Amino acid sequence: MKETIYHFSINYNINHLGTEVVETRTIKREYKHDASNSLQYLKSDMKTYFVKEADDRIAEILDKESFLGLTSEITSDQFNMFMDKSCNLFSIDMAELNSR
């Protein structure tokens, strides 16, 4: 029997000039079985904004690194809700997810 795990992730990348942040939010499903794992990227939303518009903590990290990735495991109910076409992934609060 396959074990299914769902993930919500946020990735921040800074452009080569150091002026813009590309933020990508993704919903993934992972099947754990046998010796291999199968990961499916099912939904993504992306936006670009100036570094000065980024959260201070994110901007500070991106000043030192060009990439930052955050991932949270989500429930199957959250997965179904987030996969709804009307759900904008930028409306999801990562801190709220991690507090559950």
Image (cartoon, rainbow, N blue to C red):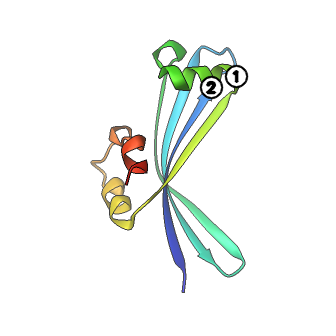
Q: Nearer the viewer, residue 61 or 23?
A: 61
Question: Is there a contact, CB below 8 Å, between mark 2 and mark 1?
Answer: yes
SS type, badge 1:
helix
How many labels, in total? 2
Relative to 19, 87 lies left or right: left
Q: Check residue 28 in the rendering and tell me which mark sits there, or answer none.
A: none
Residue neighbourhood size for the residue with mark 1, other residues' Cα within 10 Å, grouped as few (<14), some (14–19), many (≥20): few
Q: Nearer the viewer, residue 12 or 45?
A: 12
From this viewpoint, which residue is outermost toward the bottom?
Answer: 1
Q: Quadrant of residue 76?
A: bottom left
Query: What is the CA distance from the residue labelled 2 to the residue labelled 1?
Result: 5 Å
Question: Which residue matches tag 2?
Answer: 61
Position in image of residue 15 (x %, y %): 64, 22
Position in image of residue 53 (x %, y %): 46, 16
> Which residue is at a point 56% across and 21% down the rendered structure image?
59
From this viewpoint, which residue is outermost toward the right?
Answer: 35
Position in image of residue 49 (x %, y %): 48, 20
Relative to 21, 87 lies left or right: left
Q: Looking at the picture, which amino acid does disc 2 mark?
A: Ile
Up the image or down, 34 lies above or below 56; here it is below
Residue neighbourhood size for the residue with mark 2, other residues' Cα within 10 Å, grouped as few (<14), some (14–19), many (≥20): few
Q: Quadrant of the N terminus?
A: bottom right
Question: Which residue matches tag 1?
Answer: 64
Position in image of residue 46 (x %, y %): 47, 36
> Which residue is at a point 55% across and 28% down the rendered structure image?
22
Q: Quadrant of the C terminus?
A: bottom left
Q: Nearer the viewer, residue 90 or 41?
A: 90
> Which residue is at a point 69% across and 20% down the rendered structure image?
16
Relative to 56, 89 lies left or right: left
